[in-house]
Amino acid sequence: MSIDKALFTRADFKCELCGSQENLSAYTVAPKEDEIVICSTCLATIDSPIDNESHWYCLNDSMWSVEPVVQVMAYRIYSKLGKQDQLEMMYMEDDVKAWAKEGLSNESQEPTRDANGTILVEGDSVSIIKDLVVKGANFTAKQGTTVKNIRMVAGDPTHIQGKVNGSTIFIISAFLKKL
């Protein structure tokens, strides 16, 4: 796709994600049909960023862009990579974050379910139904412990992420009950 002169100028004549100045094209960010300037390397792995994970270290700079469309793409790529720490650092207006989440394709992934088969979603509170030894943290997560504001693990519907005893841990969803 050819690049509009105003878009190319906004991008400072380089890829808005990694800063490369070679093999540039316009990339449409659905569903708002807004565009960014992107290089061929970013374009090749944007749908499956795990294939070239080291390339995406460039997002540490571009995630701070003042352009909402660039923030949306950084958010989507970090989500696909499972980079929760970077996602938490990003500041986005509510409408921009909604746009970013809207474009993530989670339809093909099975929903995360608790021990009773109830679907869990990001932000739910759950209770641990069995004592669980936490590897590497030298403690046991006791039965009945409440884990608030859980997070989903990208690409793995059998696990969630949450804080127990001040430590962020991964927990198999079959050992949880939604509150």
Image (cartoon, grey):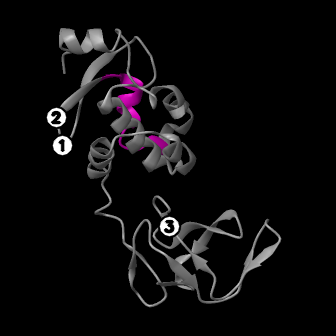
Secondary structure under the numbered disc 1 in the rendered image: loop
Nearer to me, 63 or 39: 63
At a point 45% along the width and 32% down the height, the residue shown is: 63
The residue tagged 3 is: 149
At a point 79% along the width and 66% down the height, the residue shown is: 137
Please indicate whether residue 90 sits to the left or right of residue 99 in the image. right
- Identify whether 162 is placed above or below 30: below
The residue tagged 1 is: 31
Marks 1 and 2 in Cβ contact (< 8 Å):
yes
The residue tagged 2 is: 33
Q: Quadrant of the N terminus?
A: top left
User: From mark 3 to mark 1, how far is it between C-alphas?
Assistant: 28 Å
| Mark 3 neighbour class, 10 Å CA radius: few under 14, some 14 to 19, many 20 or more | some
- Identify whether 27 is placed above or below 129: above
Amino acid type, mark 2: Glu
Secondary structure under the numbered disc 2 in the rendered image: loop
| Label 3 vs 1, first from the N-terminus | 1
Q: Which residues are magenta?
A: 37-50
